[in-house]
Amino acid sequence: MDYIDRALAAVKEKNRYEPEFLQTVTEVLGSLRRVVEQHPEYEKAKLLERITEPERVISFRVPWVDDKGEYQINRGYRVQFSSSIGPYKGGLRFHPSVDRSILKFLGFEQIFKNSLTGLPIGGAKGGADFDPKGKSDDEVMRFCQSFMNELYRHIGPDCDVPAGDIGVGSREVGYLYGQYKRLTRQYCGVLTGKGTTYGGSLIRTEATGYGLVYLTHEILSHRGKSLEGKRVVISGSGNVAIYAAKKAQELGAVVVTMSDSNGYVYDKDGIDVPAVQQIKEVHRGRIKEYVAGHPSAEYHEGCKGVWSVPCDIALPCATQNEIDLESAQSLLKNGCWMVSEGANMPSTLEAVAAFQKAGILFAPSKAANAGGVAISALEMSQNSLRLSWSAEEVDQRLKEIMAHIYESMSAAAAEYGDSPEDFVTGANAAGFLKVAEAMMAQGLV
Ligand code: NDP
Ligand code: 2IT
């Protein structure tokens, strides 16, 4: 057994009940063989053992009162995974499925994603097993306030800067920020994704979806291709999905699907994105409501069916493991030749292997969805400067950051991958090397 296999076996032994975390560690470590061969010093420094162990995991009770006056108890977390290259940074997820394994997977991915942006941010993730769906604004506010009553002692603008993720958007960030300010009497950049009237950055709302499409465009244009006229299947209808759809259409693509956890809509004429925004962002409704005003559209129950719709390009933008082997095979069979991941780890290990075997273009999430956290880092910069940049300036920087990610991922794929288009290895190696160098310089911590 080499160092990678030994480290991986130890992680598996130690984290037996954390399948999502083991999935990402298996992928990342498995792609670092050539990197580790070139750096024998990493083994003596126990670098892989250290990088796979979070610096800190905080778990806490979140009690709150619902509108009926009944007491409710949820479990909150913050996984502070790595502060090697900057303060802990990463989103908060509110979803009933949230547990330690999911947050450790997300926190681990965030280390390398944040490194790839080229900006000084460490890796973290947090959240709660709270379901905002069907809750009133007042209930969400009381939950957020109670959550922050614990979280505030662990975060700060130079220590740990949370943001949004599934179930946490501008409404939740607003309530969290208000409570942090009340508890600490500090008006600072402790959260990103804030409203633009109180320190938020322009383009942060759009950044993940736009960044996903900018990276996709970058990969295509280096191969003499473009999004013009391409049929694009998108899953999800939340923050990432909506702005990915909008930007893909701006670049000439025909987006034919969007989905939620109940089902998907197929609109052969192309999805009417403002209508989806109205349903999801304004009314917090369900995607099936879309068909009411759109006779060209069909609604299908079940979210997996979206992968059976013929397309050129798939942009999974809902959640982890939404594309399993069967879905991957269905995409391939129906002509899909590119997958760019908007969600975090939307493809299972078997699905990724199928895409790689088929030789299609595959942009892994830690590169493809890094635009969101990159603009979060720019929000931190603007807060420190006590300035706000224009939308044009932030959008331009986002394009440059995604182009830089493409360059680093491609260069590392050529050096450490099985082929110059092995972007999985490229993204992992490029993200890892910067963090590893910083860890080596900082001694045994
Ligand atoms: P939202 O909460 O805005 O939207 C989530 C969407 O995904 C909804 O359409 C939701 O449907 C669907 N979804 C969530 N869970 C499931 C599930 N278990 N099965 C099927 N569909 C599901 O979240 P975001 O758009 O912010 O996040 C989407 C993905 O992008 C996540 O993987 C997130 O980690 C990732 N991401 C987000 C970033 C950001 O800046 N927001 C940055 C980088 C990555 P429903 O309403 O039915 O739950
Ligand atoms: O997965 C992610 O990168 C995010 N949810 C965004 C994190 C952030 O800090 O903006």
Image (cartoon, rainbow, N blue to C red):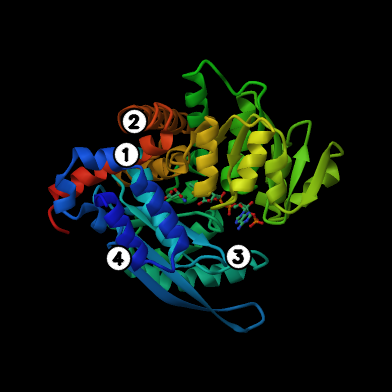
Q: Position of residue 132 (x, y in %)?
A: 60, 65
Q: Which amino acid does label 1 sit on?
A: Ala
Q: Which residue is drawn at 35% across and 70% down?
A: 58
For marks 1 and 2, give the CA distance.
Answer: 9 Å
The residue labelled by disc 4 is 56
Looking at the rendered structure, the secondary structure element under dot 1 is helix
Along the polypeptide, which appears first: circle 1 or circle 2? 2
Q: Which amino acid does label 4 sit on?
A: Arg
Q: Which residue is drawn at 68% across and 50% down?
A: 304
Q: Residues within 10 Å of mark 3 (few under 14, many from 20)?
A: some
For marks 2 and 3, give the CA distance.
Answer: 38 Å
**In the displayed structure, does residue 339 sit left or right of residue 380?**
right
In this rendering, does residue 177 appear at all?
no
The reply to whether the C-beta atoms of the residues labelled 2 and 3 are less than 8 Å apart is: no
Q: How crowded is mark 4: few (under 14 residues within 10 Å), some or many (20 or more)?
A: few
Q: In front: mark 1 or mark 2?
A: 1
Q: Specify the label residue 132 is tagged with.
A: 3
Q: Position of residue 200 (x, y in %)?
A: 45, 47
Q: Residues within 10 Å of mark 2 (few under 14, many from 20)?
A: many
Q: In front: mark 1 or mark 3?
A: 1
The residue labelled by disc 2 is 408
The residue labelled by disc 1 is 429
Looking at the rendered structure, the secondary structure element under dot 3 is loop
Along the polypeptide, which appears first: circle 2 or circle 4? 4
Distance from mark 2 CB to nearest ligand 2 atom below 8 Å? no
Placement of the C terminus among the 4 image quadrants: bottom left
Q: Specify the label residue 374 is tagged with.
A: none
Looking at the rendered structure, the secondary structure element under dot 2 is helix
Q: What residue type is labelled 3?
A: Pro
**In the foreground, 119 or 266:** 266
Q: Based on the displayed image, in which of its 4 quarters is residue 137 positioned?
A: bottom right
Query: Which residue is at the far front?
Result: 1
